[in-house]
Image (cartoon, rainbow, N blue to C red):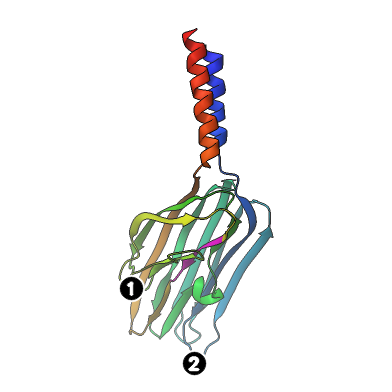
Amino acid sequence: MYKKLFIVAATCAAIHASAQVPVSSTFQIGVSADINQLTNGYQLDTLSASQLGTLNPYSGSLSVQDSDPVNAGHSVTATSAASASWVDAGHGSVAWRNMGWKFDTVTNAEATLNGFVLSAPVWSYTFKADQNGSFHLNYDVRGMGDTFGLLGLQIDWSGVEGGLSLINVSDPTTSGTFSRPLVAGETYTVGLSNMANVFVNQDPTTRSGHMDADFGWRIQTVPEPTTLVGFAGLVALSLRRKKQ
């Protein structure tokens, strides 16, 4: 009896399993720090990677500091770290850590992170839907310290209904679920862009803040009617054998 029920359960799992086709993905972070925009050079560092048709994980971290050549001990530092991984083509996660800055300066200063440096998402994933269904992305963003200028993020979506802006100039802290429909045979791209960018024009100022975020996404498919009929038949057959 247990063996027969296990066969039905395994069949059910196969029916609902997601077999999306991965097309490509990108991973990009960047940091820039400039303590005196007109008279002093700036510090910039970027990291980018991409892949076609594979699901290898990404990770990286950056930190740059620009110091004031006139006022010793005054500086601005920008930091950024992120990672992304796949359970399979239909499930995965992305994490952002320590995306922010520290100011200790008596001169004009600015720090720029990610989207504004590279004009591209921190992470993007392009896939082809094998069945009708839906895409779901849970997001949890936390701002810490002086959060002004961290701004938050933009969820990019190439399909129907488009993306979602979660920008807040005062505090990026937010959480929720982003959902969009999928049509079998269509290709979709989802992206997560960090919009942080801050300029300080105070004399003097000492401040620091950063943003962490966690994203978990999944693709849910809708079985074709013929598949559902076949599955219903398997369940009926199993129940009949169980009674016998």
Local secondary structure at mark 2 = loop
Closer to viewer: mark 1 or mark 2: 1
The residue lying furthest to the left in this view is 170
Looking at the rendering, the stretch of residues picked out in magenta corresponds to 188-195
How far across and down, in percent of the image, does residue 165 sit? 39, 68
Local secondary structure at mark 1 = loop
Q: What amino acid type is highlighted by mark number 1?
A: Val
Label annotation for residue 33: none
Q: What count of labels does the image hold?
A: 2
Residue 52 falls inside the magenta stretch: no
| Residue 73 appears in the picture as rendered | no
Q: Work out whether 99 lies above or below 135.
A: below
Q: Residue at label 1?
A: 169
In the displayed structure image, the side of residue 106 where residue 184 appears, left or right: right
The reply to whether dot 1 and dot 2 touch (C-beta < 8 Å) is no
How far across and down, in percent of the image, does residue 129 sit? 57, 53
Q: CA distance from mark 1 to mark 2?
A: 25 Å
Q: Residue at label 2?
A: 38
Q: What amino acid type is highlighted by mark number 2?
A: Leu
**At 40% across and 62% down in the image, what residue appears?**
211
**At 45% across and 61% down in the image, what residue appears?**
98
In the displayed structure image, the side of residue 185 where residue 155 appears, left or right: left
How far across and down, in percent of the image, does residue 112 sit? 48, 75
How far across and down, in percent of the image, does residue 91 sit? 53, 46
Q: Work out whether 130 lies above or below 190.
A: above
| Residue 88 appears in the picture as rendered | yes
Identify which residue, 144 or 230, lies in the foreground: 230
Q: Earlier in the sequence, mark 1 or mark 2?
A: 2
